[in-house]
Image: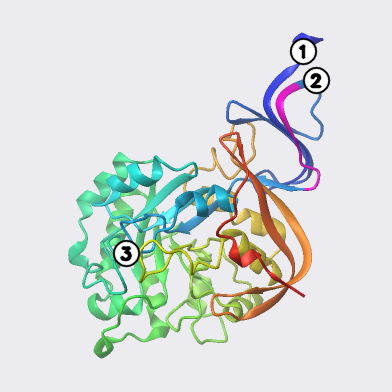
Amino acid sequence: MENHLKYYDLVLLNGWVIDPSQSLNGRFDIAIRDGKIAAITKQLKTYKSQLTFAAGNYLICPGFIDLHVHVYEWTTTFGVPSDDVGINAGVTTIVDQGSSSPFTFTGFKSDIVEKSQTDVRSFLLVNHATSQRIGDTVSGLESPEKIDIETLIKVAQANPKIVRGFKVHADSGSISRWGMDVLKLAREVGDRTNLPLYVHTGELFPVDEANRPNPEKVVENALSYMKPGDILGHCYSCQPDGLMGKRTQVPEWLFAAIDRGILLDLGHGLKFSFDTAKRMMAQGVFPHTISSDAHGNFKKLHDDSTLNYSLCGGISKLMALGLNLTDAIAAVTINPARVLKADAEIGTLKVGSIADITILKLVEEDCLLFDAIEQPLKAKQRLIPVAVLRSGKLIQPNCRLLRDLVAITM
């Protein structure tokens, strides 16, 4: 009988598994061997494992993917430690959105990607606007003159696993100075590399008031340069030049964009609004992906003391607004994995995939959660990470930057 035993490095027993990539929602055992998923079944039999984790009280999901963070410490004022918004926040893969440009990517790769336990990917910034940002002003770093198309393409093609797209800004400040020129050039880069654009929405850079664009036209005009698979960031922003702005009704052009394959990302950040989210969700507009936009203080070097939102916090807030748990999990697993074109490896618990797993406690407790403008929302549940597996290695997160989940109980 000994010869019939299957040997594993780690077994998770009887966890509540939600894996939207396989339409799984129930109790399963999961076996890990050599950093990969070796088995997932209702009950493992005749096996030996070096380590067993009793998962009966926990929710087991594919490793969470945060599609929008800023982790280029020291080079940008606002970069935060990659592992603190990654594995230590219950997240196994993070995507830095535009903290590095093609001219600063080498340092990003050697100092951040290669030194992190978290799986770090990148959407390269098409210019320099936030890749060399010190303080609050950028003095033309976001201009089209700062875009080197050939170097962008060269860096992306030389680093295909890490560079999975490009970041560009469609905000009133940039448009007041350069119109849509930056987006036009970004479109060319996306087309030539077959990689998606992540388009920031909502006022960010200083506006030339003499040329301030109509806020209700900013995103609509930007969509002319977007193709299926491209992403609109900050979908529930309270900014007047955001997707919703001050409207009460979702504009028809946004429905049309979604119908043709434009994806929406939460990008919580500093402008996520419960009021905006309620209006849009009531009309059937939901994010394809949920992300945090975790970053530090723009005005103070290497200071994350003001960071009071997280990926698990964002999920909990959207659930309190009515998003169901399975759709929420899909928005941080298989959906962003497909954006990265990495869904054979991550965002899934399929046998043979990388053993990146997020283990959570679904806390059932009345509490208050807050949006980015400090508006409260009554909630009954919170998702708290208790462990992650990163390539099969079991890690207990320190949860240092999960301040938004230290909720006010009622």
Quadrant in which the N terminus appears: top right
Residue behind mark 3: 130
Quadrant hosting residue 407? bottom right
Q: Which mark is residue 192?
A: none
Q: Secondary structure at mark 1?
A: helix
- Give the residue at x 30% y 86%: 212
- Amino acid marked by disc 2: Thr
- The magenta stretch is 48-57
Q: Position of residue 237 (x, y in %)?
A: 50, 76
Query: What whole-number distance in Å separates the C-alpha atoms at marks 1 and 3?
Result: 57 Å
Camera-nearest residue between 193 and 31: 31
Between 90 and 275, the one lying in front of the other is 90
Q: Nearer the viewer, residue 328 or 106?
A: 106
Residue at 51% from the left image edge and 64% from the top image edge: 265
Q: Position of residue 73 (x, y in %)?
A: 37, 55
Please tell me whether mark 3 sits on a helix, a strand or a loop. Answer: loop
- The secondary structure that dominates the magenta segment is strand
Q: Residue furthest bottom?
A: 210
Query: In the rendered image, which residue does mark 1 sit on?
Result: 4
Q: Which residue is mark 2?
A: 46
Q: Are marks 1 and 2 in contact (CB under 8 Å)?
A: yes
Verify CB contact (< 8 Å) between mark 2 and mark 3: no
- Indicate the quadrant where residue 144 lies: bottom left
Judge depth for marks 1 and 3 and give the one in front.
Answer: 3
**Magenta-drawn stretch contains 52:** yes
| Coloration of the structure image | rainbow
